[in-house]
Amino acid sequence: MVFQLKYLGMTLVEEPKGEELSAAAVKRIVATAKAGGKKLQKVTLKVSPLGIILYESVSNQLIENVSIYRISYCTADKMHDKVFAYIAQSQRNETLECHAYLCTKRKVAQAVTLTVAQAFRVAFEFWQAAKEEKEKQVKCGSDGEAASSSQSESSASLGSTKGGGEHTFLCFVGTFCRHNDFYTVQYV
């Protein structure tokens, strides 16, 4: 799913999730954007079970590709109802960043949040199926080694490798809350 948004900015956060945390971060981002007085960057935000891909709308140049397992929280902000925001772990230095986007309408902010929630659900289902298939192949013995190897590669695209090659999906439990037409999704 593709959305045309305006990038408000980013701020560092201390925790991977939380309604109050994200609301405070969005408030800082909006205040900074207003104080800057600059025209907001138009972006194309593409959501899939692999993550969020951001392009500069005019040039279609790739800005960032955020893997689904790095995102820990997303929300349609309550106070700023046209703002969609997510918290993700930076690929560069492992810090937690809250990114905020201005949508044309409140319903668009809600739609982006719901789409990210659905992407997580689909990604988790793929990951679960790959894990079950790998376990079946391991039980079959050495006949499944070649297939098991290729299966590990596909599950790694939806997870992270920890320690001894074990693949884990960092954001596999999602809760979806609707509060007076505002949507929040958190992954733990």
Image: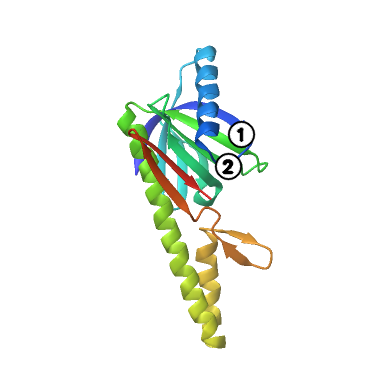
Residue 90 appears in which quarter of the rendering? top right
Determine contact: label 1, label 2, CB under 8 Å.
yes
Q: Position of residue 75 (x, y in %)?
A: 44, 37
Distance between mark 1 and mark 2 Cα atoms: 8 Å
Q: Which mark is residue 185?
A: none
Helix, strand or loop at disc 1? strand
Image vertical order of residue 42 relative to residue 89, above or below: above
Q: Which of 8 and 27 is in front in this view?
A: 27
- Mark 2 crowdedness (10 Å alpha carbons): few <14, some 14-19, many ≥20: many
Q: Residue at x 50, y 80 (%)?
A: 137
Helix, strand or loop at disc 2? loop
Q: Nearer the viewer, residue 121 or 92?
A: 121
Q: Where is residue 12 in the image (x, y as percent from the top left)?
A: 62, 32
Disc 1: which residue: 13
Q: Residue at x 55, y 48 (%)?
A: 70
Instruction: Name the amino acid, label 2.
Output: Pro
Instruction: Name the amino acid, label 1.
Output: Val
Disc 2: which residue: 16
Residue 159 appears in which quarter of the rendering? bottom right
Q: Position of residue 43 (x, y in %)?
A: 43, 31
Q: Which of 131 and 67 is in front in this view?
A: 131
Q: Nearer the viewer, residue 125 or 158?
A: 125
Q: Which residue is drawn at 41% across and 62% down?
A: 125
